[in-house]
Image (tube, rainbow, N blue to C red):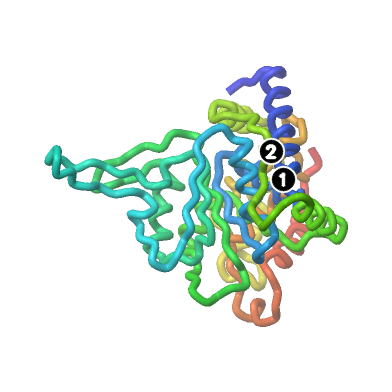
Amino acid sequence: MDISQQQFEQATTTAQQVRSQIGNAVVGQINAIDQILAALIAGGHVLIEGVPGLGKTLLVRALAQIFGGQFARIQFTPDLMPADVTGHTLYDQNTGQFTTRRGPVFTNLLLADEINRAPAKTQAALLEVMQEGQVTIEGASHQLEPPFMVLATQNPIEQEGTYALPEAQLDRFLMKVRIDYPDPDDEVRMVAKITNNQIGEKLNVSQVNRIVHPDNVLALQSVAAAIRVDDAVFDYAVRIVRATRSRNGVSTGAGPRGGIALVRSARSLALMQGRSFVTPDDIKCMALPSLRHRIALAPEFEIEGQSTDQVLTRLLEEVEAPRV
């Protein structure tokens, strides 16, 4: 698809406005905001990981407030059933016919809160919808209206009552975004903002304006997909992914979907920064969120306390970047 300079500039302006609006509600967390916005523009899904109280749900709520489409939230619990996610059929005694009750996945933005609290069969209910953009209920397929994005949250420190996400589902997420503790200055601003003239701990997104609609998001995605990528940059992304498969300390490396996610994310980042081409730095910047959930460390590395981010950071230092 060929895009005009006007379309590109308009898309960049829209992306920067969305980023600014999210910042009106979320203090700090610039990297997380950029990564989640990049996933939206790339048409992917995001797994957000962080300890309680760091603003994971607030960030998603702010994005939903900006977005003029439909928003739904599912609180995942151990007794949540697949039909509670996708929907089911009901028999209407008055008409003598079965009717379909659509579940909360029939939306544009879906917040899957604490996704690792539900058992595997319920988590698997999201697999089809995340990959195919459709839901099968009683043998009938129902298409979802684009754009569709799953933003799932999980707590990395609480193990009781949680279920590890299957590798097949992890691979469906374009990125795994980690939200860490804020910087001292950001934390001071956060505490002041939340406690001034506000009662209780209700999430406040009143300062966020609704500026985009589903058509705008689809236009952003089309422009990002047309961002130019040099052959050398494609090769760089693939070399990074392939290096994870032979890396010492990595028991399972990233598959081809890792390289695809890496390039798609880098295209979105380039658009957000006002460039019509992808640089090696874009690839490197998006490597951790795109690959950290696609590799598994060897047991001895985990015992030593090493993390996937540490392994990937060293790998990026060793894989030579092209000069383009």
Disc count in the image?
A: 2
Question: Which residue occupies the foreground of this view, 212 or 300?
Answer: 212
Q: Give the image location of residue 61, x and y in percent.
A: 61, 46
> On screen, 88 above or below 211?
below
Local secondary structure at mark 2:
loop
Q: Quadrant of the C terminus?
A: top right
What is the three-letter code of the residue carrying label 1?
Ala
What is the three-letter code of the residue carrying label 2?
Val
Q: Give the image location of residue 112, x and y in percent.
A: 51, 54
Instruction: Evaluate whether residue 210 shows in this view.
Output: yes
Q: Which residue bears the numbered disc 1?
A: 25
Q: Give the image location of residue 132, x and y in percent.
A: 41, 43
Q: Are marks 2 and 1 in contact (CB under 8 Å)?
A: yes
Residue that protrudes farthest toward the left in the picture: 96
Q: Around disc 2, counting alpha carbons within 10 Å, would you say few (fewer than 14), some (14 to 19), or many (20 or more)?
A: many
The answer to which quarter of the image holds residue 268 is top right
The answer to which quarter of the image holds residue 7 is top right
- Badge number at residue 175: none
Marks 2 and 1, how far apart at CA: 7 Å
Q: Give the image location of residue 137, x and y in percent.
A: 28, 47
Q: Quadrant of the N terminus?
A: top right
> On screen, 168 above or below 64?
below
Residue 116 located left or right of residue 244 = left
Q: Which residue bears the numbered disc 2?
A: 208
